[in-house]
Image: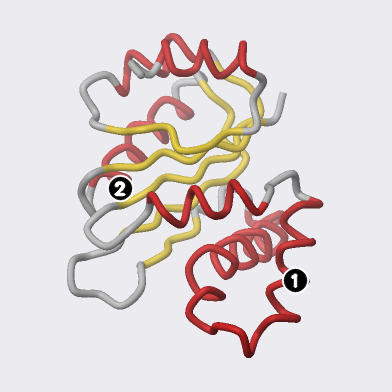
């Protein structure tokens, strides 16, 4: 089952560290990463740095559009204000078609702030228990996922809350 998850870290470097652990888990066959992106927001920066994973070059363009739309809606559109009202409506409608509601966008926007980082991951399948073992001790918080409550419970237990 394909899942979209967003993990928050209390430092700008946290998501980069978790990304390397997740890539190793994928290399070892524990999880199938469709694509991912890392958002790092250094203290004093006006906006975050965004790094798209591009897991598959063939699909990279499509995922680049997805991440661009998502991050535009989360980090850049609120800065534009009322003048971009029509654009905001179009972006909100597009993200809802992807299964990401405006409430989810707002929750992510309120959590990923200056001095933090986040790992956005789209996965297809995986052994959450074994992946969780790899990520134990990493200080992170699940902000959002489109998994069912039961799947989310397994994920939180596997990743240590």
Q: Residue 125's spot in the image, x, y percent?
A: 63, 22
Structural distance between the alpha carbons of marks 2 and 1: 32 Å
From the viewer's perspective, tell me whether residue 50 is left or right of residue 43: right
Asked whether 64 or 42 is in front, the reply is: 42
Residue at (65%, 85%) from the top-left corner?
84
From the viewer's perspective, tell me whether residue 106 is left or right of residue 133: right
Q: Earlier in the sequence, mark 2 or mark 1?
A: 2
Residue at (48%, 28%) from the top-left corner?
26
From the viewer's perspective, tell me whether residue 80 is left or right of residue 56: left
Residue at (69%, 48%) from the top-left corner?
101
Name the outermost residue toward the bottom: 83
Numbered disc 1: secondary structure: helix
Q: Residue 18's spot in the image, x, y percent?
A: 32, 37
Asked whether 31 or 160 is in front, the reply is: 160
The reply to whether the C-beta atoms of the residues labelled 2 and 1 are less than 8 Å apart is no
Question: Which circle marks residue 100 in the picture?
Answer: none
Q: How is the image coloured?
A: secondary structure
In the rendered image, the quadrant that contains the N terminus is top right
Q: Which residue is mark 1?
A: 89
Q: Which residue is mark 2?
A: 16
Of tags 2 and 1, the one toward the viewer is 1
């Amino acid at each position: 089952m394909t899942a979209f998850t967003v993990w928050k870290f209390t430092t700008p470097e946290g998501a980069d560290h978790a990304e390397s652990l997740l890539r190793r888990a994928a290399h070892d066959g524990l999880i199938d990463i469709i694509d991912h992106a890392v958002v790092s927001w250094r203290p004093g920066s006006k906006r975050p740095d965004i790094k798209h994973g591009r897991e598959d070059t063939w699909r990279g363009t499509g995922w680049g559009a997805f991440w661009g739309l998502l991050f535009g809606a989360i980090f850049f559109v609120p800065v534009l204000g009322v003048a971009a009202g029509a654009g905001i409506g179009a972006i909100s409608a597009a993200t809802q078609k992807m299964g990401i509601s405006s409430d989810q966008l707002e929750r992510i926007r309120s959590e990923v702030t200056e001095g933090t980082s986040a790992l956005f991951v789209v996965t297809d399948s995986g052994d959450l228990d074994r992946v969780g073992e790899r990520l134990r001790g990493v200080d992170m918080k699940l902000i959002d996922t489109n998994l069912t409550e039961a799947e989310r419970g397994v994920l939180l237990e596997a990743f240590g809350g």
